[in-house]
Image (spheres, rainbow, N blue to C red):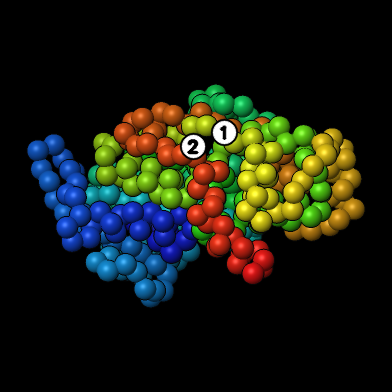
Amino acid sequence: MLSGATGFLGSAVLARLGAHGAPGAPRTRERPGTAQELTVRAFTRRHVALPAGVEQVHADLARPETLAGVCEGADVLVNAASHVGSDEQQCNLVNDLGTAALMEEARRAGVRRVVHLSTTAVYGRGPHRGASVTDLGPAPGSAASRSRLAGETHALRQGALVLRAGLVTGEGDRWVVPALAELARRVPGLWLGGTGRLSLVAVEDLARLVTAAALRLPAAGGAVHHAVHPQPVRLRDLLRTLAALGLLPPLSGELTWQQCLSLMRANPGRIRERQLELLAQDHFYSGESLWDACRCDPGPGPLARLPGAAAWYRRQLGLV
């Protein structure tokens, strides 16, 4: 069972799970000594076209009464649904109360394994440098991150494997690269010299990791992991890669933090100072353990994946 199947990450996970469940796909071992074909069920708020062979049911985390029975017969639940806007009521309705209701349905249906997607934003303001889950206490600073932390509590009570993802790039990304594109116009220069290190992960690699966690790992008993590429990315390398792809103007000249803030205030826009802080300062986390546990290759890294998403980003940014 997959929730959030039409979202940014959920659609990528669905494609991976659908490949496993397609006719002729490798069989997956659910219990030692047994093998079975993977059946994929996805719930969506409305009818949409899904890959062939995927069972579709209609439910909405914002309307808990619609969740009745969605987990019946499911061995594994992957919860990739969330609300990431600024509306506190909607965030609480989906990320907190909706998650609680979904986890109750999983308990009632006897689901053996739950993978729940969360975010490193629950840690709040940094800088954060290579911290493990046990090194940091949550300090969420937005409605979305506060409610997603609350959702983690419900998932952990159900024995879920909670995956805190870092910044996710690739087709469907409407925050990371669009934010960088706006800031490149408003704050032209290398913010803090471009020295900040960031935990990024390409959406296709994160989807591989989530799928591996769902199909290979035993029931977690309530564990939290970082879902990031093991190697952090330097901000200046990210900006140069995007400029080489024609997605940003080339940036040069080192800016102090005060210069950054002065330029932001002089050139108003959608992105706030706190978000610039997230992108300009160190925000990277330890990430090797989950890849190792899932026996999953993290791949070449998010910078190497960006060319494959460049055409999508150009359309998204209005550059074509």
Quadrant location, the C terminus: bottom right
Mark 2 touches mark 1? (CB < 8 Å): yes
Of the pair 28 and 76, the residue shown nearer to us: 28
Q: Which residue lies furthest to the left in this view?
A: 33
Q: Which amino acid is tagged 1?
A: Pro
Q: Where is residue 89 in the image (x, y as percent from the top left)?
A: 60, 60
Q: Eyeballing the image, is 70 above or below 198?
A: below
Q: Eyeballing the image, is 50 above or below 19?
A: below
Element on which disc 1 rests: loop
In the displayed structure, does residue 111 sit left or right of residue 203? left
In the displayed structure, does residue 74 sit left or right of residue 308? left
| Residue in view at x 44 percent, y 34 percent | 225
Q: Where is residue 72 in the image (x, y as percent from the top left)?
A: 23, 59
Regarding residue 45, the answer to whether it shows in the image is yes
Q: Which amino acid is tagged 2?
A: His
Q: Residue furthest front?
A: 244
Q: Position of residue 10 (x, y in %)?
A: 42, 57
Q: Position of residue 94 (x, y in %)?
A: 50, 58
Q: Eyeballing the image, is 41 above or below 151?
A: below
| Residue in view at x 41 percent, y 56 percent | 12
Residue, disc 1: 232
In the displayed structure, does residue 259 sit left or right of residue 68? right
Element on which disc 2 rests: loop
Residue, disc 2: 229
Quarter of the image where one finds residue 41: bottom left
Q: Eyeballing the image, is 91 above or below 251?
A: below
| Residue in view at x 44 percent, y 29 percent | 288
Q: Which residue lies furthest to the top in this view?
A: 135
Specify few, some or many for label 1: CA neighbours under 10 Å numbering under 14, 14-19, or 20 or more: many
| Residue in view at x 56 percent, y 26 percent | 131
Quadrant location, the N terminus: bottom left
In the displayed structure, does residue 131 sit left or right of residue 272? left
